[in-house]
Image (cartoon, rainbow, N blue to C red):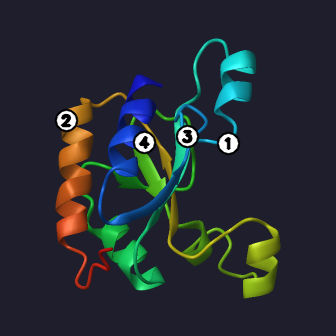
Amino acid sequence: MQNALALAQWLEQHEQVEFVNYPGLESSAYHDLAKKYLTRGFGGVFSFKVKGSSEAADQFVNSLKLVSHLANVGDSKTLIIHPAATTHQQLSEQEQASAGVEVGVLRVSAGIEHIDDIKADFEQAFANIAEPVLS
């Protein structure tokens, strides 16, 4: 859970990230409720959106070396998935939207690797996005 918070905070400041959804972030609309009800921590799973196209998100995921591209959560290893392109790809755009699935949003299950190693892997993956859209 410490890695999830640290990674979410780091991603929230990253120029190639549009937004991060994690109740442990003070910027989250659910932060106060999370502090009240999640007394043992905010959990190890969160999502974030890579700036750019669906292809940019896929390129990011495919560039990761330490982090595994898998659909499950709660592993001791850091995992990532692009639900719009994998677990929900059979749905129409409207069905995805009604299910809260957005193109470019990646779901992360933070593992127990050293946080600096996870960040380094994410950083090299951001560098491999062919056409990053920066603000």
As shown in the figure, which amino acid type bears the numbered disc 3?
Val
Looking at marks 3 and 4 on the same chain, the residue that comes earlier in the sequence is marked by 4
How busy is the neighbourhood of tag 4: few (under 14 within 10 Å), some, or many (20 plus)?
many
How busy is the neighbourhood of tag 2: few (under 14 within 10 Å), some, or many (20 plus)?
few
Between the C-alphas of marks 2 and 4, the distance is: 13 Å
As shown in the figure, which amino acid type bears the numbered disc 1?
Ala
**Is 30 located above or below residue 108 in the figure?**
above
Q: Is residue 92 visible?
A: no
As shown in the figure, which amino acid type bears the numbered disc 2?
Asp
Q: Is residue 129 rendered to the left or right of residue 105?
A: left
Between the C-alphas of marks 3 and 2, the distance is: 18 Å
Q: Is residue 5 visible?
A: yes
Between the C-alphas of marks 1 and 4, the distance is: 15 Å
Q: Position of residue 67 (x, y in %)?
A: 32, 50
Kind of element beneath mark 3: strand
- Give the labeled residue for mark 1: 29
Q: Is residue 43 rendered to the left or right of residue 128?
A: right
- Give the labeled residue for mark 2: 116
